[in-house]
Image (cartoon, rainbow, N blue to C red):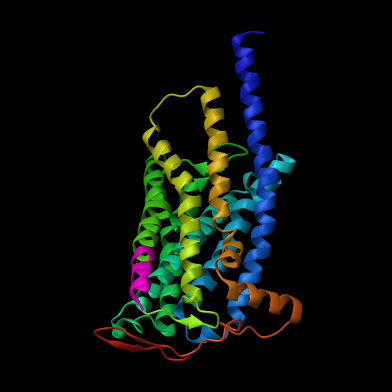
Amino acid sequence: MSSTTTNQYEVTQLLDIAEDLFAYVGLTILLLGTIGNMINVISFARLESLKTLASSLFLLTSCIASQVVLVTGLLTRVIRGFSLIDPVYTSVVLCKVRWMIRTAAGAVSLTCVCLAAIDRYLSSCHNVHRHGLITIKRARWSIFISICFWSSIFSSYAVFYTAPTPLSCTIANPIFAYFTSYFNLFHYSILPLSVLSIFCMLTWHNLGQQPATYIRGGIRLYDQITRMLIAQSIDILITSFPNMIWQIYTVTSQSTTKSSLRMAQENLINTICVLIGFSTHAITFYVYLLASSTFRKNVKDMLLRNRRIKPLSNANVIKVTITKTDQKVTLPIP
């Protein structure tokens, strides 16, 4: 068997593996993500604290945007994995709409998580004047502005994404394609990861300096929303990091001449990174379950007993006065 024939066989095998990954792993992510996001939306919509806690509103919006990402971004790739026909390739309009909505929704989702992280940081500050800086009204305006901002930014995708050849959906303008590579790296990786890392560390530092709130049994109890948010931020950091590294490689190797075998190998690596990136929008519910016993109980009550969700219903919080050598702190009953 000649070297050319061997390379062609390897290329075909690598491309088939990439399609199978999108079909089976992508379908699993899509189903688990859809179930999780739906439960998240219902849970946050029924939380009584939603009326007074801006973070809950941010996380609710993030879950909705994440589901939009899965439907517009992953569903068509799953269909292609099974049928070898991507619906996006059959319509220029669908091609434009898919990339604009998918990218804007992803940006809105991460923006809302970042805003929730900022809100939790402000709420954990010792300066009580910072606690009320992000009100529900301001949160709603922030969400509205975020949606409008990212929709206007990525409306350019609706202009430049097209089908230059049959069965294709890509950016035909080389200058815009070059700019998009760097912009995607910044807005989808570097910026949100930096914001989440900084504010989660600041929040954790503030929580460590605050007096403890104890429940029956002497167990320390942190703010449940803060715990869930920190866990989600760690999840985003872990699942976004491979894609960020791959984007850096892609940007730095754009001018490199590549063989068909290397392109197939890179396509497989890109598929794995993309699927890991989609999991960012799919496993939030399961991260919340692991991070918060209150959230687990609320979900159980909602699914099995159909009770109205009550924050911190799994704990009897008591008033504790902690006396230090230089100050006396009294913790109020919620």
- Left or right of 5? Residue 107 is left
The dominant secondary structure in magenta is helix
- Left or right of 206? Residue 77 is right
Instruction: Decide if residue 87 is in sight here.
Output: no
Residue at figure coordinates x 63%, y 83% from the top left: 309
Residue at figure coordinates x 41%, y 59% from the top left: 153
Task: Tell me if residue 155 comes above or below residue 301 in the rendering.
Answer: above
Task: Tell me if residue 250 comes above or below residue 304 in the rendering.
Answer: above
Residue at figure coordinates x 73%, y 75% from the top left: 303
Look at the image and say whether residue 312 sits in the magenta stretch: no
- The image quadrant that residue 174 belongs to is top left
Bounds of the magenta span? 200-210
The location of residue 302, given as percent across then percent down, is: 70, 78
- Left or right of 173? Residue 170 is right
Residue nearest the viewer, comparing 87 with 199: 199
* Image quarter in which the N terminus is found: top right
The location of residue 216, given as percent across then percent down, is: 55, 83
Task: Tell me if residue 154 comes above or below residue 248 in the rendering.
Answer: below
Instruction: Decide if residue 123 is in sight here.
Output: yes
- How many marks on residues? 0
Residue nearest the viewer, comparing 156 with 149: 149
The location of residue 150, given as percent across then percent down, is: 43, 63
Task: Tell me if residue 313 comes above or below residue 261 in the rendering.
Answer: below
- The image quadrant that residue 331 belongs to is bottom left
